[in-house]
Every structure is written in structure tokens, then in C-alpha cells.
Image (cartoon, helix red, strand yellow):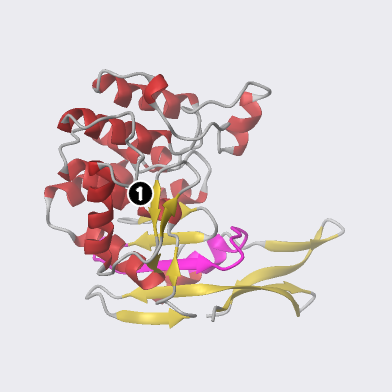
Amino acid sequence: MPAALAEIIRNEMVESVHYGHLVLLNAKGETQLAIGDINLPIFPRSCVKPLQARAMVKAGLNLEPKLLALVTASHSGSETHIDIVRQILISAGLNESALQCALDKPLGEVERKQWGDAAPTRIAMNCSGKHAGMLATCITNNWPIENYLAMDHPLQKLILDEIESASGEKSVNKTFDGCGAPLFAVSTLGLARAIQNVTVGADSASAQIRHAMREFPELVSGIGRLTQRWMSVIPGLLMKEGAEGVQIASLSDGRTLAFKISDGGFRPFSVITAAALAQFGVKAPDESVSVFGGGAPVGTIRATF
């Protein structure tokens, strides 16, 4: 069963509770803290993008760090993000017509407002960098691009192998993510192990992924978003959020956290992530979340651990 990870406090009374599963691994890969059922399969959503990108690099994808950062991204859809996605496609001799991700408007709040009433596009979709990387990897290996999202495509088989090998688990449920790419269920513990494997991996592909994400956090997410803000100020932090309340964060020595919010909400993300990092002795920026009554603070969101 999931356990309480965060409470919403109004006038010193618990009003609501966010339940979920959370695990912290120490630098040796041992479980430092476990809350909820960390062995329950979850869909890790975009938190596995570093693993997907590592599989691509191992398969021959060769991009400069700025472009590689977009392959790991759930980007906000800024002009810069979209331009870099185009650069990835051009490097493979393609254009955005090759993308098969879902149609969408930009993910970022500011970027979506700027987009206005324009029709959704594939390149504005927050996973378009990953899809561009997949296409470029296919071109490098002479694999077909018409069905690059098929579960039995050579690239997707490699990605599944990468996730299962790094997590130490066999995926028990195979489906498709919101963007259209194959999605493989692993446990919260398996997700943490997989991300730790990227953080401490001595291979060139792991080093390239770490460097790209840490060097360009504004490309991994977007200006003003939690991932960008914290990766910019916490040395060595590698962080990635996923849809439906999934989060990972890993430090340069391998200490890693992963959690899944059962209700799929993002409201307690900063509070839970800060409390988890505090367990590692790392102080995150103060981003307390207030609860309001009539425009005035009357409470807060607090972690339960």
C-alpha cells in the first residue's frame, strides 16, 4: 500500500494527504529509506529519459552536449528548445515531418501563453527532443524510421534491455507513453537503481548523459521550472520529473532518490524532494508551499518524513 509522503496543513490541521512510494539509495546502492511499497511496479514516464538517451548513445547517436540534453528533456517548448530539436533532425538529414510524437502545444506555462491559439504541433510537444534522438539513432543504424515507435523495433528493444539491465528487473507491463513511445513498468526501487547506474556509470555513454543534463538544465526542462532551478544551484545534481507524479534526483556520488505520488499530482514535488535531499545532508532552495485562506497564508504543505 502507498504511504503518506506529504500533508496539507490548514490552520494546524491536516486537511489532505498525498500518498505514494519513495526510496533513497546511499552511494553504495543500499536502501537508506523506504516509504510505501518500493517494489510495486509503476510507469516511470519521463524519468527514464536518461536511460532511453543512454541506449541511443550506445547505439551510435553522436550529438554535442546541448543537443543531447534535449534528447533527455521534457522541454517547455520555447523557441530555443524547438530550434535545437530541428538541429537534431537536420543532423540526421530529416525534418519535423518525420516526428511521430503526439500533437501538443508547449508544456511551459509562459511558452503555452505565447503560443496562443496556434494549432498544436509535434515539434512543440515536450518529448520531441527524445523522438528526434530516436530518429537520428535509427538513421545511424540504417533502421527503418516509419515504425520507430513500434514495440518490436530494434531501437525500442535496445531501450527495454537498457532499462531492465540498469534497474535489475524485468518489466512486467509494456504499453505506450503519452508521447507515443513504448513505456515499460519497473518498481520505484528499480527506477532508483537505474538512475544511480547512469550517475555512477564509468562508460562513455553515461558520462555524456550526465554532462549534458548538468551543463544544460534549462534544456532538460525550461527556464523557471523546478528541475532547472535546482540543478542550477545544487552541485552535481541530476534531476528529472515524469508525468503522473514521478520524480528522480541523483547526486554525483550516486546517492539517489525516486518517488511516485499515487494521485499523480505535482503539488508536493518541491517539498518531498527537498525533504529527501535533506536525508542526504543536502540543503535544497527554500520553496515552501503555502496554503491560503482569503489571500493570506493559513498553512503549508509538509513532508511526513
Residue 227 vs 286, above or below: the answer is: above
Q: Which residue is mark 1?
A: 49
Total numbered badges shown on the rendered structure: 1
Quadrant where the N terminus sits is bottom right
Image location (x, y in percent) of residue 154 = 22, 43
Which residue is located at x 43 percent, y 29 percent? Answer: 81
Which amino acid is tagged 1? Lys
Dot 1 falls on a residue whose secondary structure is helix
Q: Is residue 103 left or right of residue 58?
A: right
Q: Is residue 10 left or right of residue 128?
A: right
Q: Is residue 262 magenta?
A: yes
Image location (x, y in percent) of residue 270 = 54, 61
Nearer to us in this view, 213 or 185 = 185
Q: Is residue 221 left or right of residue 109?
A: left
Which residues fall within the magenta stretch? 251-274
Q: Residue 210, can we see it? A: no
Which residue is located at x 40 percent, y 28 percent? Answer: 99
Which residue is located at x 39 percent, y 43 percent? Answer: 217
Which residue is located at x 48 percent, y 24 percent? Answer: 79
Q: Is residue 269 left or right of residue 8?
A: left
Image location (x, y in percent) of residue 236 = 30, 56
Q: Residue 14, can we see it? A: yes
Q: Is residue 283 magenta?
A: no
